Amino acid sequence: MTNPRLIQNFSGAQALLIAPPGTATEVLAGTLLKLGLTVASVVPAGEAPWLDFESLDPERHIVIVDGDLPLPGIAASAVSDLPPVPVVGLVGAEAPSRLKGLLQLGATGLLRKPIHGASVYAALFLAVNEHNRRRVLEERLARHEERRRGRRHVVKAILRLMQEHGLDDDAAYEALRREAMRARQPLEAYCEALIRTRPSPVAPTVAPRLARS
C-alpha cells in the first residue's frame, strides 16, 4: 500500500460540529464555509454519544467536537483507537482530563478557543492528513499480523508434505509455493486451506505433481 495522498483542499467535505451554540461556533462555521466545506451542527443534548461515528464517510466527513463536553462517554461507546473519520478537538480549559478525552476520541488536530479563523485551515490539514497516515499504518500492521499468523500454516504444511511425500523442507516449500502461484493465492492462505483438507492434507490434483518434484 502506498502512502496516503496529501489532502490540501477540503472543498466538498462536510464538517459535523458537536458543540453548544455560541460565538465560537459561529466564527468556526463561517470559516469552514469559506474553505468550501458544508457544516452540520450536532447540538449536544443529554448524555453522550450524540453521533454514530460508524455511519460516517471517511472520505467526506470531519468531526469537530468541543473538548469541554463529556468526551469519555463518546470514546467508550462510539469509537475505537482510531475513529473512522478525522476528528478535530476544540480546546478551552487545558485540563489533563479533557485533553485525555480528546486523545481517547482519536483527535489528530486541535483548535484553541476562542477560535480565530486563520488557525482553522492548519487544524484541518493536520487532522485529516495525520488521520489518513495512521489509518494506513493500522492497515499495514493488520496485514503483517495476518501474514505472521499465517506462517504457522506454512510450517505445518511443509512438515506434512515432508512426512507424507518424503520431501526435504526446501522441496516441500517450493512445491507449496508453486501450487499457491497456480491457485493465485497467497502462500499462507493456500497452506491454511491445504492443511484443513480432509482426509488428506494434499488435494488429489496436487499429490501427483508433488511426487514428481
Image (cartoon, rainbow, N blue to C red):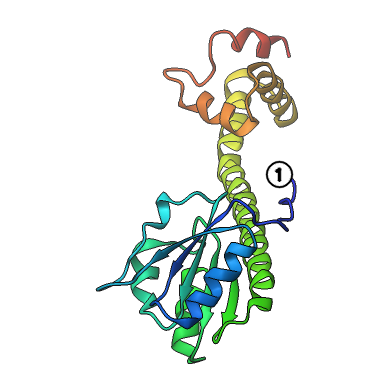
Query: x and y percent of residue 168 in the render?
Result: 71, 27
Q: Is 175 placed above or below 61 here?
A: above
- Report the number of numbered marks: 1
Tell me what residue is drawn at x 67 percent, y 58 percent. Answer: 133
Q: Tell me the amino acid under the disc marked 1.
A: Met
Front residue of 140/171: it is 140
Quarter location, residue 159: top right
Q: Is residue 190 left or right of residue 118?
A: left
Instruction: Give x and y (percent) for residue 135.
Output: 60, 55
Image location of residue 96, percent across then percent down: 49, 90
**Residue underneath mark 1:** 1
Q: Are there few (<14), some (14-19), or many (20+) residues within 10 Å of tag 1?
A: few
The reply, left or right, for residue 174 in relation to residue 113 is: right
In this rendering, the answer to whether 172 lies above or below 106 is: above
Relative depth, front residue between 16 and 211 = 16
Judged left or right of residue 25, residue 50 is: left
Is residue 107 shown to the viewer in this render?
A: no
In the rendered image, is residue 11 in sight?
yes
Q: Quadrant of the N terminus?
A: top right
What is the x, y in percent for residue 119? 67, 77
Residue closest to the eye, 142 or 102: 102
- The residue sitting at 71% across, 20% down in the picture is 178
The residue under the point 63% across, 73% down is 120
Instruction: Say what secondary structure mark 1 lies in.
Output: loop
> Where's the C terminus, which quadrant?
top right
Which is more toward the observer, 203 or 22? 22
Q: In the rendered image of this protein, does residue 189 appear above or below residue 70?
A: above
